[in-house]
Image (spheres, rainbow, N blue to C red):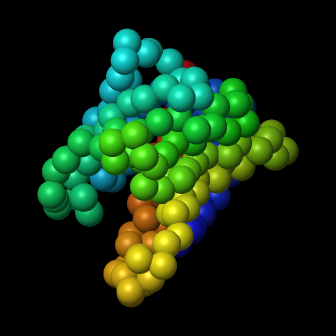
Amino acid sequence: MRGAVTVHMNAPAMDIWNLVSDVRNTGRFSPETFDAEWLDEVDEPAIGARFRGHVKRNEIGPVYWTTCRVTACDPGREFGFAVLVGERAVNNWHWHYAFLPEGSGTDVTEAFRTIESPVLRPLELLGYVRKRRNLRDMRTTLERIKTVVESPG
């Protein structure tokens, strides 16, 4: 399963990237992840850096922590991470952000992609419902980021 949402923001790509790539900001924007923190004495994004997010699934629960590993970290261009179970990724680029300068601003795309597996195929209907939710939440996240980066001073 995969999906993506793009929102144009009237701000430089690097400004938006700095906000998104500091996972401690996640709770300001995400409808589901209300807190996040770096792990292993890390305090900035880098490939392989781990962090954990405090999630309230579908904004109603259950509430749990997920551990993630940064998989893409190109300042001003992309930021992404995989959600882990133990040390193994359960999905790739869940969430992945791409920043493309466009005109006087930036097109910001948030995307997700789950690992495709024959074992998960019977859950496709549930996956459709989850995909719809992800797309709606990604738009909400991007619109909240847009409000911050386009605010004066």
Most foreground residue, 18 or 89: 89
The answer to whether 87 appears left or right of 73 in the picture is left
The answer to whether 95 appears left or right of 88 in the picture is right
Occupied quadrant, residue 28: top left
Occupied quadrant, residue 65: top left
Task: Residue at 61% x, 46% y: name it.
Answer: 97
- 67 over 122 or under it: above or below: above
Q: Is residue 11 visible?
A: no
Task: Residue at 44% x, 82% y: name it.
Answer: 121
Q: How many labels does the image show?
A: 0
Q: Can residue 72 be seen in this view?
A: yes
Question: Looking at this rendering, what residue extends furthest in the right direction?
Answer: 103
The answer to whether 8 appears left or right of 94 in the picture is right
Task: Residue at 22% x, 52% y: name it.
Answer: 56
Q: Position of residue 55 (x, y in %)?
A: 26, 48
The answer to whether 16 appears left or right of 140 in the picture is right
Most foreground residue, 76 or 144: 76
- Quarter holding the C terminus is top right
